[in-house]
Image (cartoon, rainbow, N blue to C red):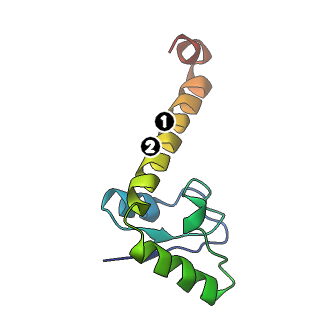
Amino acid sequence: MHLILQPSFTESFNVVTADGIWAGVPTVASTAIDWVPERWQANPDDATDVARVGEYLLHCPHAVTEARRMLTEFVEWGVLAWRDFVSPKLASAA
């Protein structure tokens, strides 16, 4: 697979996109999946915009590297938020 299409209207995290990134496959997403690079986000109501972003991703050699960094940061933030929710004392000690 060379490209994943996930121009979602409402989905936020999107496991398919995360799995694709770790497999080295970029995703055409939308602003609903806000943790991906902005250049990966297309207007889900505009097929031309989806195609434009897809073409960019297919030709960008650094797209997946940038997204892996953003995914890692998003997951790290999520772990910290979860720790704070579960045990505020534990999170502040970390």
Q: Dot 1, how many residues are within 10 Å of its Cα: few (below 14), some (14-19), or many (20+)?
A: few
Across and down, in percent, residue 80 comes to 54, 29
Q: Residue furthest bottom?
A: 48
Helix, strand or loop status at disc 1: helix
User: In the image, is residue 38 above or below residue 8?
Assistant: above
User: Identity of the amino acid at label 2?
Assistant: Thr
Q: Nearer the viewer, residue 70 or 78?
A: 70
Q: Is residue 8 above or below residue 62?
A: below
Left or right for 23, reference 64: left
Disc 2 to disc 1, C-alpha distance: 6 Å
Residue visible at 60% across and 72% down in the picture: 8
In percent of the image, x 55 and y 31: which residue is there? 82
Q: Quarter of the image holding residue 58? A: bottom left
**How many badges with numbers are in the image?**
2
At horizontal 53% and vertical 14% (from top left) the residue drawn is 90
Query: Is mark 2 in CB contact (under 8 Å) with mark 1?
Result: yes
Q: Nearer the viewer, residue 51 or 61?
A: 61
Quadrant, the N terminus: bottom left
- In this figure, which residue is indicated by the disc labeled 1? 76
At which x and y percent is residue 61? 37, 65
Kind of residue at badge 1? Glu
Q: Which residue is mark 2?
A: 72
Label at residue 63: none
Indicate the secondary structure of the residue bearing disc 2. Answer: helix
